[in-house]
């Protein structure tokens, strides 16, 4: 029951974040959304979790889950837009891979320390939000000196600041004026700051970009990864594993499949975006079918060796789908480079 409440409140926060927070990166800046706003929400979440641990109050923890849902669009879109717009063209693959690496590194630390035999107990779990709070403060202080996205600065007609930002991110020896001119050309594709859906649909290039973005967002909405992350221990127990075995399995799979996190850029370059997206879609929905089939077998005949093997397949696919780059590279590139696809001829 509590897992369902936490999942529901988190998803409500997700939906509200798309409506209210995603536009913030356009009118307040990429840096404001990805650094300042995300830092504020993270601190609010950790405070709720620490208070929940102190007072043993599930209501405060649920409030924290609701607030945590607001980081969805900032983490999924805002941060990646900021990074990919700041990175030079020849370093965007590395920037995307770095995001994947940091996520996997965090999972390795979590799975190795949150075992019931270590910190995963009712009396010690408060250490995790406390660590997140302290590390977030350190990272926030380090990021304060970073300038805003040069693309966003050009859109705001702040060309001089855009040159300084390019010099900071690309280096003093980079072709600063050429990069600024390309961004100005991209920005001049439309003469209006806002476009209506009808205008987008009547323009063939904008329509194709919009359809690809919508397909990607639909893919993410029907993704079962978040549900799997919430109910992972319960699913493992129902499949026939103990809690300790479940944590060990997640840790082993993360370590074994760690090298696959670096194939995303290679796969995109070798096959292209659409074939990669298609492959990821097949694996994603195969995972969903396996979850459903495993749950049906457990409901009918209980756990067995078959359900354990089937659920191991679910865990492997859960790691392999992001390894294609569909979650980290594609969504960031679709949103941050959507305008660069439409770059006018020089």
Image (cartoon, rainbow, N blue to C red):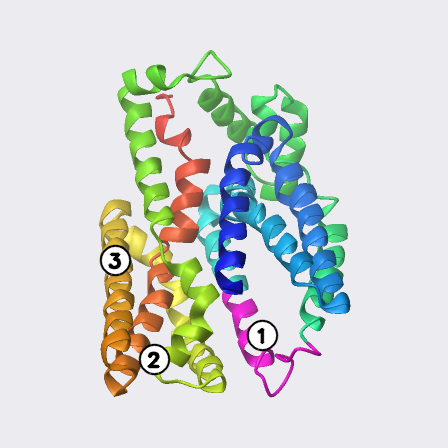
Residue on which the image places disc 2: 239
Q: Quadrant of residue 131?
A: bottom right
Are there few (<14), some (14-19), or many (20+) residues within 10 Å of tag 1? few
Q: From the viewer's perspective, is residue 98 above or below residue 258?
A: above
Q: Is residue 132 above or below residue 186?
A: below
Q: Camera-side residue: 191 or 280?
A: 280
Q: Please state the horizontal and vertical placement of residue 218, each as a whole percent of the image.
A: 33, 43
Circle nearer the N terminus (2, 1): 1
For the residues marked 2 and 3, what is the alpha-carbon distance in whole angstroms? 20 Å
How far apart, in angstroms, are the residues tagged by discs 2 and 1? Answer: 25 Å
Q: Identify the residue at image location x=55%, y=40%.
A: 17
- Say if the magenta span includes residue 106: yes
Q: Which residue is mark 1?
A: 109
First-in-chain label (3 vs 1):
1
Image quarter where the C terminus lies is top left
Highlighted range, magenta: 104-124
**Residue 63 vs residue 205, the one in the foreground:** 63
Asked whether 62 falls inside the magenta stretch, the response is no
Point out which mark residue 201 bears: none
Per the image, label 3 sits on a secondary structure element best described as helix
Answer few, some or many: residues within 10 Å of disc 3's Cα (few below 14, many 20 plus, some between 14 and 19): some
Q: CA distance from mark 3 to mark 1?
A: 28 Å
The residue indicated by pointer 3 is 285
Residue 176 visible within the image: no
Residue found farthest to the top: 191
């Amino acid at each position: 029951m509590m897992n369902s409440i936490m999942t529901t409140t988190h998803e409500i926060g997700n939906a509200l974040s798309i409506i209210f927070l995603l536009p913030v990166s356009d009118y307040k800046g990429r840096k404001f959304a990805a650094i300042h706003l995300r830092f504020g929400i993270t601190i609010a979440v950790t405070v709720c979790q620490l208070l929940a641990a102190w007072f043993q109050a599930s209501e405060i923890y649920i409030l924290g889950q609701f607030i945590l849902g607001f980081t969805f669009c900032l983490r999924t879109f805002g941060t990646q837009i900021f990074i990919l717009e700041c990175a030079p063209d020849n370093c965007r693959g590395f920037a995307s891979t770095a995001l994947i690496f940091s996520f996997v590194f965090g999972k390795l630390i979590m799975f190795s320390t949150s075992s019931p035999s270590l910190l995963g107990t009712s009396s010690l779990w408060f250490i995790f939000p406390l660590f997140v709070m302290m590390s977030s403060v350190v990272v926030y202080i380090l990021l304060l000196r970073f300038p805003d996205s040069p693309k966003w600065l050009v859109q705001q007609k702040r060309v001089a600041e855009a040159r300084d930002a390019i010099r900071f991110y690309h280096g003093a020896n980079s072709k600063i004026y050429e990069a600024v001119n390309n961004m100005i050309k991209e920005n001049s594709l439309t003469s209006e700051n806002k476009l209506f859906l009808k205008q987008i649909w009547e323009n063939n290039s904008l329509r194709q970009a919009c359809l690809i973005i919508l397909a990607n967002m639909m893919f993410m909405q029907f993704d079962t990864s978040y549900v799997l992350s919430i109910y992972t221990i319960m699913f493992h127990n129902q499949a026939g594993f103990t809690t300790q075995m479940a944590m060990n399995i997640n840790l082993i799979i993360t370590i074994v499949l760690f090298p696959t996190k670096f194939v995303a850029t290679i796969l995109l370059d070798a096959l292209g975006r659409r074939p990669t997206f298609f492959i990821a879609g097949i694996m994603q929905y195969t995972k969903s079918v396996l979850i459903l089939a495993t749950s049906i077998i457990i409901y009918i005949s209980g756990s067995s060796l078959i359900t354990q093997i089937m659920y191991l397949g679910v865990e492997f696919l859960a790691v392999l789908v992001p390894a294609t780059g569909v979650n980290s590279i594609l969504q960031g590139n679709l949103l941050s480079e959507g305008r660069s696809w439409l770059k006018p001829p020089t």
